[in-house]
Amino acid sequence: MPRGNQLTRQWRLLQLLDRPAGIAVDDAALDLGCAVRTIWRDLRVLQDAKFPIYTDRDADGRRSVWRLDAGFRLRLPLKLTLSELAALLMSRDLLAPAGAALGASAQSAFERIGSVLHKDALALLDRMRDTIGVRAVGAKLQAPAAHYLAAIQRALLERRRLRLAYYSMSRDEVTSRRVDPYHLTLYNGACYLVAYCHTRQALRIFAVERIRDCEVLVLRFEVPADFNVEEYLKGAWGIVRGDIVTVKILFARAAARYVRDHLWHPTQKFRDLDGGRLEMTLQVADTLEVRRWILSYGSEAEVLAPASLREALRLEAEALARKLAPLRMVPAAAPAQAESPVAAGSRQIRQECGQGWRHWPGAADRPEAGESLLQRYRRA
């Protein structure tokens, strides 16, 4: 059996052992879908790694069960179960995008939490993390932006106003802002600051990586009592907010299988259609983020509503078709040359936008076989 499967099973066994009543070997084998002798081998691995587990009798005194040492929980710095402690240690890479500013404090915290486990147990958790651990998406926040996190953290704790030199990507300029920081969040490998902007006289979301300078001011402020960050970000597709609209998207069969298997947004609802197609409805902000997500499916996705979003994507498809206009014909006298990978990729995208992928796998599964992205959005 592959090493990864063994580590995954041992992690699940550790969760079963963490139950207050413990678990019998035969029950564990049934839950994990393996042989009893396999459970015995896994128990030996956990014992050799010095996990605090032992064998005892169940409440009726009839069966032998394995459970966690009750005294171990008393030594924990927090009220955590063993599986919660292990999960926390395995997911510590989620803080990687925060960079050096939080690195030392985070490392110290994890060292204190991990001190209650034997080094062999920590080594086994590291091996499990390589197989089933959580990884942050995106690169670590780069300097100098990472160093501004300490100032932002101080301003958040002391409720002090910040002066920012902030780069606006849409206007391609650096502007001076005075903001009252309300909340700092990690999303998709990057840090974002929710703050009241005195320049815009409204709440705004600032990407920390675009901060060019940051100064904590003397002036203090109070966060409004009715501010709730979850409510503020509700409806956002990702981190960017906007006006909430009802979006309906029609997916072809080839894309439907993938879309159905994921939780894209808390409000998503699916409706099965003939031919394996899928209609997705959700309440979401009409932002650049959601438009890019829809466009990533090419002609496998078609916006049905709202009309404004459908029109925006039609214009985008037309612009893309113009940019990827057919290449000039090679003169007859010129020797034939092999098509480069870049040219081949451009040709495929041109076909998608202007002519349709009529001969691509799954083309016949679409409601209009071979219909291009541009043709779809030109339909009434």
Image (cartoon, rainbow, N blue to C red):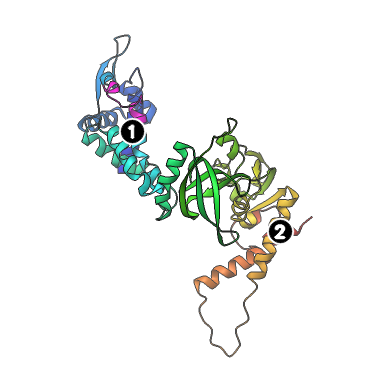
Q: Which residues are magenta?
A: 72-85
Please, what is the three-letter code of the amino acid marked with disc 1?
Ala
Q: Is residue 312 magenta?
A: no
Residue 21 drawn above or below residue 374? above
Q: Residue at x 56, y 59 (%)?
A: 169
* Mark 2 burial class by Cα count in 10 Å: few <14, some 14-19, many 20+: many
Looking at the picture, tell me which residue is in the foreground, 338 or 30.
Answer: 338
Looking at the picture, tell me which residue is in the foreground, 52 or 347.
Answer: 52
Q: Residue at x 42, y 41 (%)?
A: 154
Residue 320, percent from left and from top: 65, 65
362 to the left or right of 54: right
Q: Residue at x 69, y 50 (%)?
A: 303
Residue 233, percent from left and from top: 58, 40
Residue 295, percent from left and from top: 62, 55
268 to the left or right of 94: right
Dot placed on the residue nearer the N-terminal end, 2 or 1: 1
**Under tag 2, what secondary structure?**
helix
* Mark 1 burial class by Cα count in 10 Å: few <14, some 14-19, many 20+: many
Residue 190 in view (yes/no): no
| Disc 2/disc 1 C-alpha distance (Å) | 49 Å
Residue 341 drawn above or below residue 100? below
Please, what is the three-letter code of the amino acid marked with disc 2?
Arg
Residue 293, percent from left and from top: 59, 52
| Residue named by callout 1 | 86
| Mark number displayed over residue 55 | none
Question: Residue 369 is drawn in which quadrant?
Answer: bottom right
| Residue named by callout 2 | 314
